[in-house]
Amino acid sequence: MILVTVDDDALERDLVALLHALEAAVYRGLDSAAEMHAAEARSHHWYRNRTGDLEASTRAYAAEGSVWNDDVQATVAATEPYAHYVDARSPILEPAWQAVEAQATASLEAILEDAANAY
């Protein structure tokens, strides 16, 4: 016969720590993916960059929302007032995402895996 004893308090502490680590990793991973997306949109676009304003306004915004409510998201946007006209003529952000999606997804997965393996 094998007897196994589990320290419930230690198990609970470790599980809570793991959940916190995974939650933080989701935010870090989404922020990283958004930064990759924004960098791609700034560096590879179809429009002629006359003033630099549109390119400079294309940036990543920190992930917001709740991991546990399944509504966390990071955003990439070009915020110049005329950006939506340029994007309507020919997309800027969507092709940039398509170019980095595999790399960004792999980075997010690696960040999550590292967080999970730390425990």
Image (cartoon, rainbow, N blue to C red):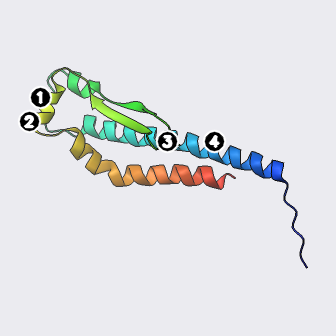
- Element marked by disc 3: loop
Q: Earlier in the sequence, mark 2 or mark 3?
A: 3
Q: Nearer the viewer, mark 2 or mark 3?
A: 3
- What is the CA distance from the residue labelled 3 to the residue labelled 1? 34 Å
The amino acid marked with disc number 3 is Asn
Crowdedness near tag 1: few (<14), some (14–19) or many (≥20) residues, C-alpha within 10 Å: few
Q: x, y (%) of residue 100?
A: 32, 49
Q: Is residue 5 above or below residue 45?
A: below
Q: Earlier in the sequence, mark 4 or mark 2?
A: 4
Horizontal side of residue 86 vs 55, given as left or right? left
Q: Earlier in the sequence, mark 3 or mark 4?
A: 4
Q: x, y (%) of residue 92?
A: 19, 38
Q: Which mark is residue 89?
A: 2
Give the residue number, with chain letter if any, for mark 1. Answer: 85
Q: Which mark is residue 69?
A: 3
Q: Residue at the far left: name it.
A: 89
Q: Which mark is residue 20?
A: 4
Label 3–label 1 contact, CB within 8 A: no
Q: Earlier in the sequence, mark 4 or mark 1?
A: 4
